Amino acid sequence: MKQLNASQVQSALRFPELIAALKQAFCSDITVPMRHHHDMENPSASRETTLLLMPAWQAGEKAGVKMVTVAPDNSALNLPSIQGIYLLLDLRTGTPEIMMDAPTLTTNRTAAASALAASFLARKDASHLFVVGTGALSSQLIRAHHAVSPLTHVTVWGRNEDKAAQVLTQVADLNLIAATTTSIEAGINQADIISVATLSQTALIEGKWLKPGQHLDLVGAYRPDMREADDEVMRRATIFVDSRPGATKETGDIKIPLAEGVITLDDIKADLFQLSAGEHQGRTDDQQITVFKSVGHALEDLAAAKLVAQYYEDQV
């Protein structure tokens, strides 16, 4: 069985091809059971460590399963918050073929899903991206959005301004006009697309700050008790998600306002399955405020893993 480390996985993935692969996957017959989500008590940390098990398969072709942990306090230990492996198997024989670095696969496919959503939901002239958060996903979100939108400017906010500057250094090759900010409100005020990827348990984005025509991309809040956007965001925005079952169950950004009657299920206009299949057009006018909430979907992992496998097959 072949094993691929983080740099090998990264070398195999390019956002234009990955975004196209995800769109095709959302239109395909890939089987995806609801992922297993286990919060494991961790008395020595401020929050539980979460274990995620995410299987997916396509009849007669490939199967895959991702096993990752999310440990929010790892930054204090100079360790990534997300760690784990992805196993790609031949479905017919059940033979494991490739084991690869799951965090790299995850950051790339998550960013690609955000960019795929933005291709339907952001204004076509969106040129300024504001990224909230400085984790491993932040630079990938910039690269992914750059692949689908005519970006000229990027601004980054983080609790640590040095880390925000480091994110911009990682994407210097894109030749964007780049800056950091110490104010989320100020960053939103000048942005066309706002992409939020944090481990915050409380809302960072206030709906009163949003302007007509903006697109908000919510990537964090992977648990029902976490959220990145307040109720006013959900009241003002037209809501889209990656998958309805996952978004309504697993993220506080959707689950909490649903439970409190701020929104209803009818307020979720479409998911990535419907957008990719052309069943919903996405943004309907340039004044509309759109929000996309992703929780992650195992078909994205399988599509990305197949792309990695194909890359190395082509190298032979």
Image (spheres, rainbow, N blue to C red):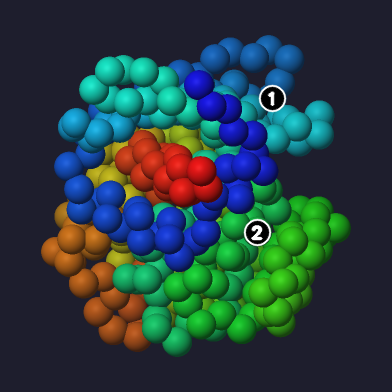
Q: Residue drawn at (65%, 59%), measured in percent from left and top? A: 139
Report helix, strand or loop for mark 2.
helix
Evaluate whether residue 203 shows in this view: no
Task: Quadrant for residue 189, please give it.
Answer: bottom right
Which numbered disc covers residue 71? none
Residue type at the position of mark 2? Ser
Q: Residue drawn at (18%, 32%), measured in percent from left and top? A: 59
**10 Å neighbourhood of mark 2: few (<14), some, or many (≥20)?**
many
Residue on which the image places disc 1: 46
Task: Quadrant for residue 268, please give it.
Answer: bottom left
Task: Quadrant for residue 96, please give it.
Answer: top left
Evaluate whether residue 266 shows in this view: yes
Q: Residue drawn at (57%, 27%), measured in percent from left and top? A: 3
Q: Residue furthest right?
A: 162
Above or below, 281 relative to 7: below
Q: In terms of sequence position, does the residue under pointer 2 or pointer 1 come before the other?
A: 1
Above or below, 43 relative to 117: above
Which numbered disc covers residue 139? 2
Q: Residue drawn at (54%, 31%), measured in percent from left and top? A: 100
Q: Residue furthest front?
A: 316
Q: Nearer the viewer, mark 2 or mark 1?
A: 2
Q: Position of residue 2 (x, y in %)?
A: 54, 27
Q: CA distance from mark 2 to mark 1?
A: 26 Å
Residue type at the position of mark 1? Ser
Q: Position of residue 187 (x, y in %)?
A: 65, 73
Left or right of residue 107, residue 97 in this image: left
**10 Å neighbourhood of mark 1: few (<14), some, or many (≥20)?**
few
Left or right of residue 124, residue 127 in this image: right
Q: Position of residue 305 (x, y in %)?
A: 44, 40
